[in-house]
Image (cartoon, helix red, strand yellow):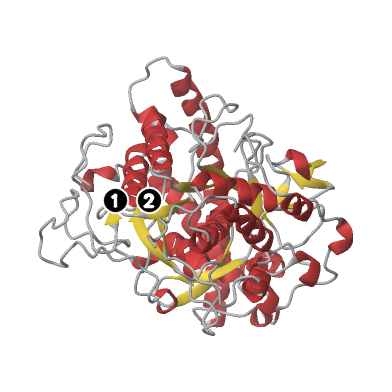
Amino acid sequence: MKFIKILALSLFSMAMTAQTADKSLAKKGALTEQQLQRWSHLDLVKDSIPGMSVDKAYAELLKDKKSTKVIVGVVDSGVDIDHEDLKGKIWTNTKEIPGNGIDDDKNGYVDDVHGWNFLGESNNENLELTRIIKKTDDGSETYKNALADYTKKNEKMLKDKFQVDFIVAADKNIRDFLGKDSYTLEELKAVNTTDKKVYQSKMVMLSIAEQAGEGFRDEINEYKEYVYDQANFNLNKDFDGRKVVGDNPEDIKDKKYGNNVVYSKDRKDSLHGTHVAGIIAQVRGNGMGGDGVATNVEILPVRAVPNGDEYDKDIALAIRYAVDNGAKVINGSFGKDYSPHKEWVWDAMKYAESKDVLLVFAAGNDAKNIDVEPSFPMDSKDKKAEIVKNVLTIGALDNQFGENMVADFSNYGQKNVDIFSPGVKIYATVPENKYKYEQGTSMASPNAAGVAALIRSYYPNLKAVQVKQIIMQSGTPVNFDVVVGKDAEKMPFAKTCVSGKIVNAYNALKMAEEMSKKIPSTKKKAKV
């Protein structure tokens, strides 16, 4: 995250990273569908797309090279472990006998064959600020800030709800007029009527459809679901999603809760985690969907992220669970503005550091400077000094190289975001053997985690802190101004993150090779 002491590297490695990307590399014209589905794997110089040069790394550096299997923990909403493109990529606990109702490995989790679900049957949840203001006003600054933020969010939600209800009503008017449950943009344009209500509805839907394209009705439904989730669950002070879990979320010692089903009751609610897992590990070159960044990996699913804000307790225990079960890289695509028990998460970070595990976190999607504004998880108490050295925080890139390459939603920060990687329109697995484009720093984080897993797979003698340094140092520097934040401010890319770079797998593996050679072998020499 912040400045870290750099290990000595060869002159070759330093020269390699000195190459700087400039605007002349920008691609002219739109990406093809084939390019879009794989853009995060492409190469800036060869393809004029700010990908991570993953394909180049496999073609030029990894061919016929041996690797070691790496376990990657995915702390998220759950993973559809039966997905066709994740076959052979899901971790199995060989110390546990499936379905016997016994904690065979005595780790406190019964029948945890493929991971653990700290949410149990729960899915929908409050935001953390809602949970805070539901408690008695203690006069604290945290309570006052949470109440002010809640008021703003609730007012916006009510306006959004009014808008979405208006759009849904217009959509229904068109469907009723056409006598169909669905319709295309062409059918909408062809609506011809003197009915004032239907005509107004046509104009409303056309304004939306012309911006969103053919998938406009899907976008409307997603928008409706998002707003209604806020109204019914996230901001609803009368809703308690935790009561079905059966634990006390205020007690970190209360650990015996949840179950061994690593996806949500309704699998579609594990879309986020399944997508993250696919970005890292979906099978390469099989003609299905997209390609994962890393090949010789297993995904260890830990369900701890609900439809709402995660509990600090769940995150802390999820990190510890993944560490204890062999994860060498853990991806955390979650985040929030308030963290009442952040010290529990910090302790888990320290535990991961002590076990040589790299934590890769999404920087967040609020288009804000997290050097100034609150954002959790964070590996610092004061936004300046690091608590641990094993955390990598990732911002999101768009696929158009140039001043708009930072995703318009991505958080940034010269001290608290380490590096950027692809996070817009990323194609990967979703539940029930489907694939989808998703975007967010949630997608950028597993792209970087995949590169970290690649390094740890091919150079297992490197420590987590070294892998972090390699990813940050070997990235492609960007030497021009970019647009960031809610106010579309222009600033040098070098000020958007610690490294001033974008992740590059090819460069990272070359640097890893150099660093690996400098580490003395621990193998004992055979006696003559």
> Is 330 drawn above or below residue 202 in the view shown?
above
**Residue annotated with mark 2:** 306
> Is 285 drawn above or below residue 485 in the view shown?
below
Q: Position of residue 244 (x, y in %)?
A: 22, 48
Residue placed farthest to the bottom in the image? Answer: 287
Residue 422 in view, yes or no: no
Looking at the rendering, in which quadrant would you find the C terminus?
bottom left
Number of other residues with Cα within 10 Å of mark 2, as a class: few under 14, some 14 to 19, many 20 or more: many
| Quarter where residue 416 is shown | top right
Q: Residue at x 13, y 55 (%)?
A: 103
Q: Secondary structure at mark 2?
A: loop
Looking at the rendering, in which quadrant would you find the N terminus?
top right
* Residue type at tag 2: Pro
Q: Residue at x 59, y 48 (%)?
A: 394
Using residue 279 as the reference point, say whether residue 299 is left or right of it: left
For the residues labelled 2 and 1, say whether their Cβ atoms are less than 8 Å apart: yes
Label 2 or label 1, whichever comes before in sequence order: 1
Q: Position of residue 28 (x, y in %)?
A: 85, 70
* Residue type at tag 1: Leu
Q: Position of residue 452 (x, y in %)?
A: 54, 56
Q: Position of residue 467 (x, y in %)?
A: 56, 50
Q: Nearer the viewer, residue 500 or 290?
A: 500
Q: Residue at x 64, y 55 (%)?
A: 514
**Residue annotated with mark 1:** 119
Residue placed farthest to the right in the image? Answer: 24
Q: Residue at x 76, y 55 (%)?
A: 16
Using residue 427 as the reference point, say whether residue 475 is left or right of it: right
Using residue 99 as the reference point, say whether residue 117 is left or right of it: right
- Specify the label residue 503 is tagged with: none
